[in-house]
Amino acid sequence: MPAEHPAERLAESADIVFTATVRAEAMRFDRVPETNVTFSEEPGERSISESRRENLPERVAEGVTYREVRVRYVLAAGLSTSARTPPRASEGPPGSPVAMGERPASRDRA
């Protein structure tokens, strides 16, 4: 079945996917909340977030009780090729003695 939403399409090939589902029998807001999602991207990265709501409008109203609420949130990111490529075994992690050109100590076994 093909994905219906952009976040799901990206999630199919994403390197990092975070999903959360919140359910409530009843939900009421005394004040309308201010919400905002921002991403900091480097060139070559792709990211998207999206929420699907059941019985909860995109903009809620003060003092209204919403019943049988369900919100599904998806955040997906595809990393750039350079971020995805692990170091070769001979290189070691950045900053390690091997990566700095030192040879690992050999262990003699008797």
Image (cartoon, rainbow, N blue to C red):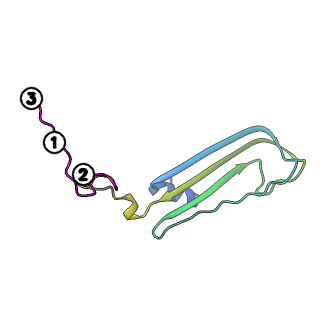
Q: Is residue 30 left or right of residue 56?
A: right
Cα separation, mark 1 vs mark 2, equals: 16 Å
Image-quadrant location for residue 109: top left
**Which residue is labeled 3 in the image?**
110
- The residue most toward the right is 63
Amino acid of disc 3: Ala
- Residue segment shown in magenta: 92-110
Q: Residues within 10 Å of mark 3 (few under 14, many from 20)?
A: few
Q: Are marks 1 and 2 in contact (CB under 8 Å)?
A: no
Residue 69 point in image, percent of width and height: 75, 43
Q: For the point 28% across and 56% down, which residue is it?
A: 99
Give above or below for 66 relative to 88. Answer: above
Q: Position of residue 17 (x, y in %)?
A: 51, 51
Q: Earlier in the sequence, mark 1 or mark 2?
A: 2
Instruction: Report x, y in % for residue 94.
Output: 34, 56
Residue visible at 78% across and 54% down in the picture? 57
How far apart in space, not on screen, are marks 2 and 3 (Cα)?
27 Å
Residue drawn at x 44%, y 60% as measured from the top left: 79
Circle 2 sits in a helix, a strand or a loop, which is it?
Answer: loop
Q: Which residue is mark 1?
A: 106
Q: Are marks 1 and 3 in contact (CB under 8 Å)?
A: no
Q: In terms of secondary structure, what is the magenta stretch mainly? A: loop
Residue highlighted by disc 2:
89
Task: Single out the mark in the foreground, 2 or 3.
Answer: 3
